Image (cartoon, rainbow, N blue to C red):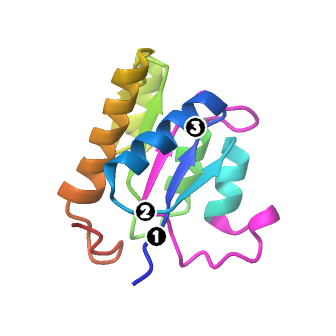
């Protein structure tokens, strides 16, 4: 069975590289699709723009979402995902520099599954991403509609 990808929505190239490296070190074996801003993420999820030919039934197993993005921010991405009204939601983890109370409250109101502030330290950042990957893709039980990707 082909594993679905993790969708990483991040505009900072350094954070992308650190995240990719940390997820690879977890050894979970999920492919990773990177979207550099919120608009590209929505294009990927809804099969628009450069992703118009993508089969949108092949959905990510998880979305790692920065909130401070160009073009369309992470909260707008969450709103679009929620407004799509899918009965089989994709787990979304906000992985962001923002510790603003309004962002945290808004993200949860819009259906984020977890909100994590990015550590500034390289080793802490790497360990945080590894823990997120292990939890959501190994320990957490997904509903059957999302798929049994555990283990």
Number of the front mark, 1 or 3:
3
Residue at mark 1 to residue at mark 3: CA–CA distance: 19 Å
Extent of the magenta region: 46-73
- Which quarter of the figure has residue 42? bottom right
Residue at mark 2 to residue at mark 1: CA–CA distance: 7 Å
Q: Nearer the viewer, residue 7 or 21?
A: 21
- In the rendered image, the vertical position of residue 148 relative to residue 82, given as above or below: below
Q: Nearer the viewer, residue 97 or 106?
A: 97
Please, what secondary structure does the residue beneath circle 1 have? loop
Which residue is rendered at x = 50% and y = 62% of the image? 31
Which circle marks residue 4 in the picture?
A: 1
The question of residue 67 being in magenta is answered with yes
Q: Which residue is mark 2?
A: 30
Which residue is rendered at x = 55% and y = 30% of the image? 15
Which circle marks residue 16 in the picture?
A: 3
- Label 3 vs 2, first from the N-terminus: 3
């Amino acid at each position: 069975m082909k594993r679905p990808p993790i969708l990483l929505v991040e505009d900072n190239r350094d954070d992308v590289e650190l995240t990719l490296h940390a997820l690879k070190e977890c050894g979970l074996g999920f492919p990773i699709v990177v979207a550099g801003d919120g608009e590209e993420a929505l294009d990927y999820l809804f099969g628009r723009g450069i992703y118009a030919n993508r089969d949108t039934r092949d959905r990510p197993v998880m979305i790692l979402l920065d909130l401070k993005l160009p073009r369309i921010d992470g909260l707008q991405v969450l709103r679009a995902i929620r407004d799509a009204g899918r009965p089989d939601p994709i787990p979304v983890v906000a992985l962001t520099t923002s510790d603003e109370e309004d962002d945290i409250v808004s993200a949860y109101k819009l259906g984020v599954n977890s909100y994590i502030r990015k550590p500034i330290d390289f080793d802490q950042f790497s360990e945080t991403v590894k823990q997120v990957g292990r939890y959501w893709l190994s320990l957490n039980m997904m509903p059957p509609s999302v798929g049994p990707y555990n283990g």
